[in-house]
Image: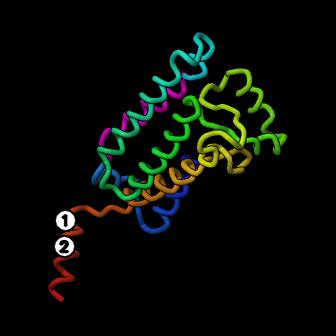
Amino acid sequence: MLLVYGVAAAILAGYLTGGRARNYLLQPLRGVLLPALALAIEACFGLLAARWDPARWLGLATCAEYALLAAFLALNFRQRGVKLLALATALNFAVIALNGFSMPVTPIVYEDPNLAVWITRIESGALPEYTLVGWDAPLWFLGDTIPLLGGLASVGDLLMAAGMFLLVFDLMRQKPASAATDSGLKSKEK
C-alpha cells in the first residue's frame, strides 16, 4: 500500500510542478509487464497455500517474483529512483530469504490490537509470505517492524515508496528531446 501512496504523491507533485502523465510516453519504462507478473505471482500465494504446503513452493515462487523485479530494474537502471528501488528490493529479498522466504513480522505487531486479524491470518497459514518472528530472527530490523498507517512496514518498503516517488515524478516532468535540445542551445548562445 505504501507503494500506492508513493505513486499518488508523485503524480500530485508532478502535476503541481507542471508535469503531465502523457510525458511518460516521451521515454517510457522498459519491461513494465515484469513487475505486473511479479505482483501476480504474489497475489497467488494465498491460493497456493490453500492447496499445497508452502514449504514446497514458496522459495521458488519468491525467487521468481524477485527475479522479475530485478529484470525490470536492470532494464531501467538509468532512470532516477531506480537505484533506490533496487536497494529496497535487495533489502526486502535479503530479509525474506533469510527467514524461510517469508517477510518477518516482529513482536511489535502484538502492540496494536487492530492487527489481531492479520496475526490470525499469518498463524493460520493464509498469508504464507509473512512469518511471525522474535527479536532474534535474522535481519529482523529489515522486516515489517515500523508501525505506519495502521499496519507495519519494512525499511525496504519505505525506500521503495521513495524510489517510486522519484521515478514517477521524473517521468511526468520529462521534456521532449527537441525542447531539451532547444533550451540547451539557447543557454549556450547567451
Rendering quarter of residue 113: top right
Give the crowd class for mark 2: few <14, some 14-19, many >=20 residues within 10 Å: few
The image shows residue 62, relative to residue 29, as above or below, that is: above
Q: Name the residue carrying label 2.
A: 182
The answer to whether residue 42 is visible is yes
Where residue 184 appears, x then y in whole percent? 20, 76
86 left or right, relative to 42: left
Q: Kindly give the residue lying farthest to the front in the view shown.
A: 136
Q: Secondary structure at mark 2?
A: helix
Q: What quarter of the picture does the N terminus occupy?
A: top right
**Which one is nearer the viewer's eye here, 61 or 29?**
61
28 left or right, relative to 101: left
Q: Name the residue carrying label 1.
A: 178
Instruction: Confirm or deny contact between disc 1 and disc 2 (CB under 8 A).
Output: yes
Residue at 61 percent of width and 21 percent of height: 46
Residue at 21 percent of width and 62 percent of height: 177
**Which one is nearer the viewer's eye here, 139 or 132?**
139
Give the residue type at disc 2: Asp
> Main SS type for the magenta part?
helix
Spatial separation of the CA atoms under disc 1 and disc 2: 6 Å
120 left or right, relative to 185: right
Highlighted magenta segment, given as a residue range: 29-44
20 left or right, relative to 12: left
